[in-house]
Image (cartoon, helix red, strand yellow):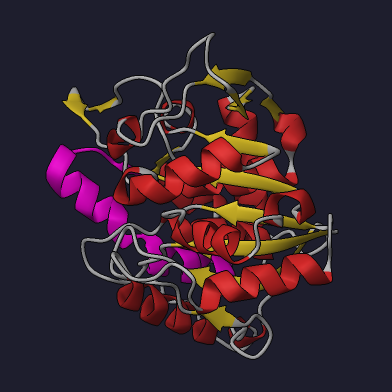
Amino acid sequence: MQKIIFDCDNTVGIEGYPMDDALAFLYLLGNRGRAQVLAFCCTFGNGTAQQVYESSRQLLEETGLSGEIPLYPGAGQGENPCGESARKIVELVNRYPGEVSFLGIGSLTNLYGAMLLDSGIFDKLGQVVLMGGITETLYTHGKHCPELNFSINHKAAAAVLSRGKNISILTGNNCLPVSYLPKAEFMEHMQVESSRVGAYIAKKCGYRFDARKAVYGEEGSYCWDAVAAAYLLYPQLFEDVPIRCAIEEEQLRTGFLNPSEQGSTVLNLPRAKDAAAFRQNLYESWSALQLTPFQNMETDR
């Protein structure tokens, strides 16, 4: 079983804000035999650090896990990165050297802070799996799609990516082809008419389907961050792609990883092998959730 530090910018439930961090978290919960979440750390990105903390606190309360999985606030944008989340990362990695996986799906502020507190942090982390970055301009619906994880704290990203070890990154370019969830397929697989957990997930995250339909006219949404969670637990669904990158802080203002044969940093940029098999794994994992609060919950019809 993998010991995991879950570091995210979850904003599920805030109107107009993404919900994919919550889907990544619920994915981990659906794989209790493989994943043990040691800490839920908050960082800024989709929203402010405070918005992320409050949204995550509510998510843990609703799922009955507020007493089981500890929640830690992260440093806000422009604040000292060596905050409560950074200190917890250092504590856990030193308690379980070589055993902890860091799953980072927001800004890299907390991991950067942990690095400043403990310069040997990467020698003690088992692996680092991130969602973020681009290797070429990203387009959705014919429009430029900005990178939103590494670029929001490019200084932290540059430091972590250039000094870190055993880093795998699910880039925006590699996530886009496999993270699209057609609404009808999502609702069918989550069995919203018969499954209490499925109904909760559909209700909690379904607002994004409506939002995207209003803007783009499509019946679907994206689960970007869940791709990184899936790679962490089921790497066999992916092909590892080690690539040399010339990491530069200025380039990371746009999240660009700058692939280059002359680059001094080798990063693993995995690609999912089969989109249908990958999505099936997502649905099975979400459907496998066993959460106490829903045992007596009436399913909305």
Between 51 and 283, the one nearer to me in the picture: 51
Q: How many labels does the image show?
A: 0
x and y percentages locating residue 13 in the rendered image: 33, 71
Name which residue lies at 43% across and 55% down.
106
Between 201 and 7, the one nearer to me in the picture: 7
As drawn, which residue projects farthest toward the top? 261
x and y percentages locating residue 301 in the rendered image: 41, 73
> Relative to 58, does residue 188 appear above or below in the rendering?
above
Name the dominant secondary structure of the magenta segment.
helix
Magenta-span inclusion, residue 208: yes
Residue 85's quadrant in the figure?
A: bottom right
Between 37 and 285, the one nearer to me in the picture: 37
Q: In this view, does 246 lie to the left or right of 97?
A: left
Name which residue lies at 78% across and 55% down.
124
x and y percentages locating residue 87 in the rendered image: 59, 75
Name which residue lies at 64% across and 22% down.
273
Q: Give the range drawn in magenta.
A: 194-221
| Residue 192 showing in the rendered view | no
| Residue 267 showing in the rendered view | yes
